[in-house]
Image (cartoon, rainbow, N blue to C red):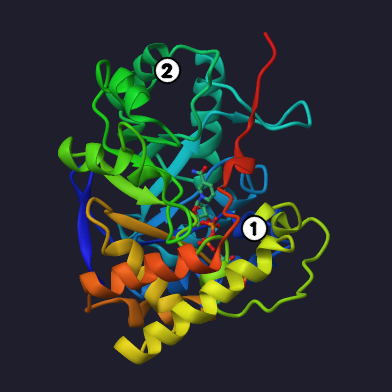
Amino acid sequence: MERVHVGGVEVSRIGLGTWAIGGSEWGAVPEQDAVRTILAAVEQGINLIDTAPIYGRGRAEELLGRAICEHGRREAFYIATKCGLNWESGRVVSDLRPERLRKELDDSLRRLGVEEIDLYQVHWPDTVTPIAETAGVLAGFVQSGKVKALGVSNFSVAQMREFEAIAPLASNQPPFNLFERDIEAGEEPVLPWCAANDVAVLTYSSLCRSLLGGRLKPGMKFEAGDVRRVDPKFQEPRFSQYLTAVERIGVLARERYGKNVLEFAARWVLDREGVSVALWGARRPEQLGAVEGVMGWRIDADTMDTVDRIVAESVTDPVGPEYLKPGVREL
Ligand code: NAP
């Protein structure tokens, strides 16, 4: 397993994502499968486990806590959890009010069964609460010893600057995969800024929410409650365009590296300049079997260019992950 430093601690370059394990947006996941998946990750050298209170409304954090307990060694886990999404009104909204943050931290520590969180990330910016105020509250959590390092997620460069003016920022967690590349673009791209400012980048949806897993077929239906029912990439005619790209990239990966599309897609993320960790969502232990094939090789520049060409030719109507953005809380 390749390793990198986040917040001064050595972590695996593949991190386990526990959104699906929460069981609320990807269909139910039996507790035993969830715990076994987390333990299988650790067995494979993955120590960074990304979670959040919103995943299963506390369930993912609880299951991670159970896995830590079953494993027995707290130090085998680098716990990256989050704060700032409120679901109490039935609708998910950003909520970074100081009193809410204090309650969330204590709830997360209790569910996880630990005394300290390694990386505490602001899940989404809250356009109502000033970022400086949030950073000040979180800095207090570090001083109190309940949090080791601070991170953000879905933050722009301007938002990270505001945060950093008040508290040290260890990481940002944006969406990034070979179809979703906003962090490389724009007037002030997030990825090079993070690299230049020693802010680790933990990419989410590295497998494009399963599109790059290689097992999806045209016409495939997702169960009720599965987030892919509303994800615009999984709706025709776009779905077929993305699947064509996946198929062509799969051929390229096989011909040039003897890899499957999943191994190639994860490697592609790790090989982009400035990426520290690629999060990998899984809900069954065997889904992590492919991690080994991602390690120990690199994608060359010509192949990177070929991927760009394949995506541009195949996906004529691209769409981003903006639908994931939470609502704004009412004042
Ligand atoms: P992802 O990692 O892009 O894709 C995960 C899906 O890929 C799995 O649920 C699985 O789908 C499929 N997959 C995994 N291993 C596979 C294998 N060996 N073969 C074939 N398919 C495989 O999805 P993600 O959940 O969006 O992102 C990963 C993590 O990032 C999340 O769990 C969460 O921790 C984090 N995240 C953060 C944010 C944020 O706002 N900060 C937002 C989204 C996600 P099937 O089980 O259906 O096959």
The picture quadrant where one finds residue 145 is: top left
* Left or right: 108 in relation to 307: right
Horizontal and vertical percent for residue 158?
34, 23
User: Which quarter shows the N terminus?
Assistant: bottom left
The amino acid beneath tag 1 is Lys
Q: Nearer the viewer, residue 62 or 84?
A: 84
Q: Report the residue at 27% width, 58% height from top.
A: 272
| Sooner in the amino-acid sequence: mark 2 or mark 1 | 2
Horizontal and vertical percent for residue 311?
47, 66
The amino acid beneath tag 2 is Thr
Q: Answer yes or no: is residue 118 visible.
A: no
* Number of numbered discs: 2
3D distance between C-alphas at marks 2 and 1: 33 Å
| Quadrant field for ligand 1 | bottom right
* Left or right: 245 in relation to 74: right
- Going by the picture, which residue comes out furthest to the right? 224
User: Which quarter shows the C terminus?
Assistant: top right
Disc 1 residue crowd, few under 14, some 14–19, many 20+, Cα 10 Å = many
Name the residue carrying label 1: 233
Q: Answer yes or no: is residue 307 visible.
A: yes
Horizontal and vertical percent for residue 207?
49, 65
Name the residue carrying label 2: 134
Horizontal and vertical percent for residue 224?
83, 60
Label ID, residue 16: none
Q: Nearer the viewer, residue 196 or 186?
A: 186
Q: Report the residue at 60% width, 36% height from top.
A: 325
The answer to whether 159 is drawn above or below residue 319 in the figure is: above
Q: Nearer the viewer, residue 43 or 288?
A: 288
Q: Secondary structure at mark 1?
A: helix
- Going by the picture, which residue comes out furthest to the top? 331
The answer to whether 163 is drawn above or below residue 314 in the figure is: above
**Which numbered mark, 2 or 1, is in the foreground of this view?**
1
